[in-house]
């Protein structure tokens, strides 16, 4: 469908962003609840791909989070404890 | 919550969030001599700001006498709406205006500018600090809480944006639901200004606002956009979240990826490099999202947090509306101060002024659009019908067919009644 | 008794995330904001813990362009009491020698009393780890690095330093300079209370060479014998990710070891 030559991996794209990554996570996922999740919507809808589905269930990493709040809204299981990073940490936009 | 540490310092007004809404409120209030503090969770003003790319100027000109120093990139003189049946082709409507009423810019830069205006007017801006709740005295909002620290103020302006953690914590609104919001994902692609002007046929300072419907969102209700900045392009996709949960098969980032690499856009985006990837929620069903009231004792709610954003189907007006609501909140506080009372009654002039302002007037005018945006047909069926029409008209080897025949045949092919098409088409035009 | 502590820090471009253009593979430097060097935040936390225990005052000191004021504000936001910014055109382009010279001379000239100087292990942007050693020798005071703990005992400081395979304890005379082992502590967050103080009271003093009167031949580019001949970007090493989960620990460990051997890491 689309020209393949410039298809890039999401991990490479988000590499252009700047983060001041906090040493503690601002989002906590209760993986137990994920086991019964009917949609796993976070996996497709987290824009930076922080949620991955593995053989052994959902895996979440907060480092690439852009604090959009999508996962919090789409999660049907209330599995996510969501706050903002403290001390101005997290994403630092420059050209948006 | 037990070990609260009430700070000695007290302000007249505390503003939660240094976005367009909060900074416009702070600017107005500081200028009028109110001791004003803005609390922002980001490292710097603008470091958490992201939007589509175009701002309507009039409300900002009214708020800021020195609007001419605004970091404008380009004035939008060209508008284009394209329907993409697939990534290879599109049907476009172009509009070239004479007088530009909107401009492209980075929101990161615009709010930084607004921050300087507020600070110059005398407001204090505190970054790095997320507000976690309101502080209450005798059931009135009387300041803000961050961690264990309490900062008191006579009145609070909530301008925290669409993710309303503070309003939620204080019990004023419920957590967001997917049907209330849309998700926007965007890339900024950089080159130099000459490159942008050549690729899009623009003259210096002239900008293009371009909207895509159809394949650009994998037929999930929503849209895609392209704005030309000084030396870059903002390219992004917006999808309604409840629809995306059900209908989006791929990862959301694939939508932007497919748009950037679409053959139909290839010639425009040559040799640009990605310089930022961002995402944010947008109020979608603004009527259901709006808190029950916009004023409470000691509290006013502005901007996205109040659902004061216009989704006109082809364009968003959030930045100027947010700023204008902040400005009106400032005026309401000024008049409440004159009455010596910050109760909900005294502050309610905010809601009245909003009602009479461009913000609510336009929101009412566009109320219908939301209904249509929810209509899958617009995003799935219509693009296909239209592309069928175009193909018949322009790619028919027997020579072009008559428009009417083409529409008729294309409707049949897509199993859709022409009467329905006409009725719905009329509805859309009316709503817009 | 109360300890007067000087915290040396650097304000550096945030390169914790290396920004590489996905199309061309080149480094992107445009608009990269600066942060307080993360290892210096650990040193700040170390100093704050000492202050909590013994009382006293912490002053953050930096030689840098005026934009570093933001870094001082961040540290005051964490609870540091005040800051000194040493800034002058003639200090620009300094290597570690010229930098340590200015810092130590400023300490001599404008700081009336101090018991302890605390620094981070190294900086994000150059990783030389010279500053601590050089400042202490300019000042002629003891220097201990890789420090994880410090305690006051009868006018001396008992300092614990952690090396790869063993722990050492030193008894040093004060004043002394210590550099804190990186990652050994979790820096605390900025609080509303402290950040308001930083912005409203601005407890920041600025000194230029007008006040310090240092010989310009010993500062900045002129005072810097080090020449960076060339820096080379080694390119991005593609990350490989494999996940092993839910097996008995023994099995997972031997799997990991075999993978690391495969990759010639061990
Ligand atoms: C993809 C997309 C495209 C858009 N396109 C356009 C467009 O082209 N034109 C247009 O006019 N509008 C557009 N909008 C809408 C526009 O961005 C918003 O309407 C506008 O930014 C709202 O301003 P605000 O001040 O209410 O909130 P925001 O801009 O969201 O600002 C809120 C601020 O508060 C801070 N904050 C939040 N919570 C806290 C807390 N607890 N403590 C301290 N600080 C906090 C945030 O960091 C942020 O700085 C778009 C939005 C999106 C997402
Ligand atoms: S949507 Fe929620 S419950 Fe489902 S997988 Fe994601 S985090 Fe888990
Ligand atoms: S907040 Fe947004 S970016 Fe962060 S993990 Fe959730 S969906 Fe992903």
Image (tube, coloured by chain):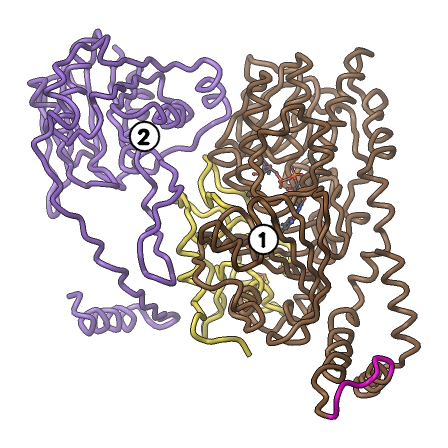
Chain colours: A yellow, B brown, C purple
| The N terminus of chain A sits in image quarter | bottom right
| Residue B69 against residue C165 in the figure, above or below | above
Q: Which residue is mark 2?
A: C45
Please state which of residues B149 and B311 is positioned toward the viewer in this rendering.
B311
**Which region is colored magenta?**
B398-404
Q: Quadrant of ligand 2?
A: bottom right
Residue sitting nearer the eye, B19 or C189: B19
> Is residue B70 rendered to the left or right of residue A11?
right
Where residue B350 appears, as percent x and y from the top left, is 81, 27
Residue C203, compared with residue B148, is above or below; it is above
* Residue B1 visible, this angle: no
| The quarter of the displayed image where residue B384 is located | bottom right
Q: Is residue B399 magenta?
A: yes
Residue that appears at 87% across and 74% down = B421
Viewed as shown, does residue B2 lie left or right of C83?
A: right
Residue drawn at point x = 65 percent, y = 53 percent? B209
Q: Is residue C81 left or right of residue B421?
A: left
């Amino acid at each position: 469908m689309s020209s393949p030559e410039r298809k890039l991996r999401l991990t490479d794209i988000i590499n252009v962003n700047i983060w001041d990554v906090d040493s503690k996570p601002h989002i906590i996922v209760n993986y137990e609840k994920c086991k019964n999740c009917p949609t796993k919507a976070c996996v497709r809808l987290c824009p930076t791909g922080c949620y991955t589905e593995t053989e052994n269930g959902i895996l979440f990493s907060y480092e690439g989070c852009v604090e959009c709040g999508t996962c919090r809204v789409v999660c049907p299981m209330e599995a996510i404890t969501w706050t903002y990073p403290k001390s101005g940490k997290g994403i630092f936009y420059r050209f948006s | 919550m037990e070990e609260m540490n009430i700070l000695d310092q007290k302000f007249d007004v505390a503003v939660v969030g240094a976005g367009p809404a909060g900074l416009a409120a702070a600017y107005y209030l500081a200028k009028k001599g109110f001791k004003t503090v803005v609390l922002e969770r980001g490292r710097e003003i603008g470091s958490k700001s992201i939007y589509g790319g175009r701002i309507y100027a009039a409300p900002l000109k009214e708020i800021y006498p020195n609007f001419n120093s605004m970091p404008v990139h380009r004035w939008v003189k060209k508008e284009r709406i394209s329907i993409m049946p697939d990534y290879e082709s599109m049907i476009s409507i172009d509009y070239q205006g004479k007088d530009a009423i909107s401009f492209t810019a980075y929101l990161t830069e615009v709010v930084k500018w607004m921050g300087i205006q507020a600070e110059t007017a005398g407001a204090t801006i505190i970054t790095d600090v997320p507000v976690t709740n309101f502080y209450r005295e005798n059931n009135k909002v009387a300041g803000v809480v961050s961690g264990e620290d309490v900062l008191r103020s006579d009145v609070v302006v909530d301008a925290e944006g669409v993710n309303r953690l503070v309003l939620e914590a204080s019990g004023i609104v419920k957590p967001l639901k997917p049907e209330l919001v849309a998700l926007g994902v965007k890339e900024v692609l950089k080159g130099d200004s000459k490159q942008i002007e050549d690729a899009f046929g623009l003259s210096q300072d002239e900008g293009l606002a371009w909207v895509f419907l159809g394949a650009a969102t994998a037929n999930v209700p929503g849209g895609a956009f392209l704005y030309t900045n000084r030396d870059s392009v903002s390219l992004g996709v917006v999808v309604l979240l409840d629809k995306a949960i059900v209908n989006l098969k791929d990862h959301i980032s694939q939508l932007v990826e497919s748009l950037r690499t679409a053959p139909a856009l290839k010639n425009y985006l040559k040799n640009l490099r990605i310089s930022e990837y961002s995402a944010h929620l947008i109020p979608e069903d603004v009527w259901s999202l709006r808190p029950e009231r916009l004023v409470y004792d000691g509290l006013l709610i502005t901007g996205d947090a109040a659902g004061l954003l216009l989704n006109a189907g082809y364009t968003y007006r959030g930045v100027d509306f947010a700023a204008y609501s902040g400005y009106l909140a400032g005026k309401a506080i000024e008049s409440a101060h004159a009455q010596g009372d910050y109760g909900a009654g005294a502050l309610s002039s905010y809601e009245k002024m909003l009602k009479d302002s461009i913000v609510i007037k336009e929101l009412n005018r566009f109320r219908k659009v939301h209904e249509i945006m929810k209509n899958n047909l617009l995003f799935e069926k219509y693009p296909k019908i239209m592309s069928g029409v175009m193909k018949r008209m322009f790619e028919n080897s027997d020579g072009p067919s008559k428009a009417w025949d083409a529409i008729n045949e294309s409707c049949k092919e897509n199993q859709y009644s022409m009467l329905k098409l006409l009725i719905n088409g009329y509805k859309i035009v009316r709503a817009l | 008794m109360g300890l007067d502590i000087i915290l040396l820090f650097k304000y550096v471009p945030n390169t914790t995330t290396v920004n590489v253009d996905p199309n061309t593979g080149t480094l992107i430097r445009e608009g990269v904001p600066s942060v307080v060097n993360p290892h210096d935040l650990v040193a700040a936390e170390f100093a704050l813990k000492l202050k909590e225990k013994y009382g006293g005052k912490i002053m953050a000191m930096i030689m840098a362009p005026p934009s570093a004021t933001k870094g001082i504000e961040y540290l005051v936001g964490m609870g540091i009491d005040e800051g000194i910014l040493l800034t002058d055109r003639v200090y620009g382009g300094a290597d570690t020698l010229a930098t340590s010279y200015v810092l130590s001379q400023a300490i001599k000239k404008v700081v009336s009393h101090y018991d302890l100087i605390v620094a981070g292990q190294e900086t994000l942007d150059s990783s030389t780890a010279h500053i601590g050693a050089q400042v202490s020798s300019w000042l002629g005071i003891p220097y201990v690095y890789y420090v994880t703990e410090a305690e006051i005992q009868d006018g001396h400081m008992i300092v614990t330093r952690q090396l790869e395979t063993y722990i050492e304890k030193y008894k040093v005379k004060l004043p002394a300079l210590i550099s804190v082992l990186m990652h050994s502590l979790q820096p605390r967050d900025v609080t509303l209370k402290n950040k308001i103080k930083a912005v409203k009271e601005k407890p920041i003093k600025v000194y230029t060479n007008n006040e310090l009167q240092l010989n310009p031949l010993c500062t900045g580019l002129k005072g810097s014998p080090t020449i960076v001949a060339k820096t080379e970007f080694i390119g991005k090493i593609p990350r490989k990710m494999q996940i092993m989960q839910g097996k008995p620990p023994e099995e997972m460990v031997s799997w990991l070891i075999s993978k690391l051997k495969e990759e010639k890491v061990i």
